[in-house]
Amino acid sequence: MATGDFDVHYVAHLARLKLCPEEERQISDQMGDILGYIEKLKEVDVSGVEPTAHPFPLVNVTRPDVSRPSLPHEDALRNAPQKAGGLFTVPKIVE
Amino acid sequence: MEYEAVIGLETHVQLKTKSKMWCGCANSFGSEPNTNVCPVCLGMPGVLPVANAEALRLTVLTGYLLNCEIPRFAKFDRKNYFYPDSAKNYQLTQYDKPSTANGHVDFEFQGGTSRVRITRAHLEEDVGKSTHFERNSGVDFNRAGVPLLEIVSEPDITSADMAYEYLNALKEILQQGGVSDCDMEKGMVRCDVNISVRPKGTKELGAKIEIKNMNSFSGVRRAAEYEIARQIGVVSKGGKLIQSTRRWDDVAGITEEMRTKEDAHDYRYFPEPDLMPFEPTDEWLAEVKSRVVELPSARKARFMTDYQLPAGDAEVFKANVELGNYFEQIAKQAKNPKAAANWVINNLQAKLAETNEQSAQEQAAMGLEPADMTLLTLDSLKFKPEQLLELVGLVEAKAISSSAAQQVFAEMFETGKAPAAIVQEKGLAQVSDTGAIEKICDEVIAANPGPAADFKAGKVAALNFLKGQVMKQSKGKANPGVAGEILERKLKG
Ligand SMILES: [Zn+2]
């Protein structure tokens, strides 16, 4: 994929990042380089290789269904920029 | 032109676990806001999720209950989006490798059996709950990370009523299967409804319109009814529908379009790097399979075949598993299973409900919350199932009248004494001795000249009144058939 196919503006919006034009240009170039490496990887013949979701040969990692004490309420809300009535408050959500 | 509706449902169901999906916080409803939260379910940096083994079991159990295939490989993926109810800014879900796929649900509909195919039932996590205020919104993360099953149906549903029956059947299977309590009031079941319409007989699907976040089955039915009519109205006038998302306004009884950003569906799924794939072993699957219960529809059919019960009775035992189990304890030995079913449904169930209603009132008066009340169950009755069978036998053999049987039942419910002992003690054995009944009939006719004259004048119902008096005089012991014959002979003669 060439740099031109990468819509930095769109991806920045999806990631909720505000970039100035200079940053947009810079990141667009960097992402273009990274995508270039990926393009190169595509040249490798992997037809005989099973796709994998994870590099470690480890499966079925679970924990028993046991409930444990949660965070003290005050600690849970400690990092909240705004709170009220035990809730995290956020700008009004309009659908 | 005639149109038909094509409906598919995505049903979200909270799983019945003690703890959340990725952390040890309690999975419980009704706690104070943000008290069942920890760094994992608050999405703090650096935390690692660990899958709840029971949630995985319940997911595969659901797969078995819904006749699904269970793939030998499943994994979790991140679904990325920003919304205040999701602290991590992504939801963990199974995207392309779900734990179950390709099943079906069979259920009764319009006098026959309908089948809705299940595309998949995959495991994901619930999000926080937001409350909207005048100037801002508040978020409670107690629900965030609760294991949630998304059951996706194929678009096999053709009407609002069928959607309603499918949902009820699904709920019954999940409740009886021990997968979820499906408490609608607590928001344990929520649906997205996909509806399109097309000219009847055509194959191509119309524009899919999704109604989001329905939290009641009757709401789904009403919304689907409205939406089908609306869409047919648009296309039959030559209008064009476009794929969109709508919201059901329950008060106004209408659906309205939701404003959605074009990029809202760019979720950029990718495999969750912090969770290992899941590859169920034979042993593990066998253990889950051993938890599969008889499906409600199969149970109903079996009760009708095995015990020759009418559909109505079998339906009661299908819906109320404990009552059905109780019935089965005596049904096999019962000479007349239908009579036994009548006693279990009409007398035992009613008496139990009545007793518990009274008991709940008394306990509420003492300040107890419903959850802390001790109520009578079928397991804690004073009498044994065989004793109810004995009572049914006494009535069937005409050893006691049905009104005497009511007295015996009340007494055994109260004391746990054996029916035969109660009959003996209270002298309730049915009198078929015509001499004794004849005497009572004479007295009743003499004491009630009005009704006696009415019957002679052709008013047939008057006989029932007189018969009732004879039963009363005999304290329920007279054989009502014999009493009726004697009265009729005396009055007509
Ligand atoms: Zn937690």
Image (cartoon, coloured by chain):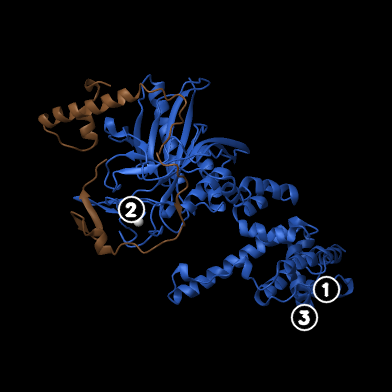
Chain colours: A brown, B blue
Horizontal side of B344 relative to B467 (left or right) equals left
- Do the residues at pointers 3 and 1 share their chain? yes
Which of the 4 image quadrants contains residue B317?
Answer: bottom right
Q: Which one is nearer the viewer's eye here, B55 or B328?
A: B55
Where does the C terminus of chain B fall, quadrant-wise? Answer: bottom right
Give the residue at mark 3: B425
x, y percent for residue B419: 75, 73
The label on residue B41 is: 2
Q: Are marks 3 and 1 in contact (CB under 8 Å)?
A: no
Q: Earlier in the sequence, mark 2 or mark 1?
A: 2
Q: Which one is nearer the viewer's eye here, B3 or A1?
A: A1
How crowded pointer 2 is (Cα within 10 Å; few <14, some 14-19, many 20+) is rated as many
Distance Cα–Cα, label 2 vs label 3: 65 Å
Horizontal side of B334 relative to B251 (left or right) equals right
How crowded pointer 1 is (Cα within 10 Å; few <14, some 14-19, many 20+) is rated as some
x, y percent for residue A85: 24, 60
| Residue B390 shows in the view | yes
Give the residue at mark 1: B442
**Residue at the image position 31 percent from the left and 23 percent from the top:** A40
Which secondary structure, mark 3?
helix
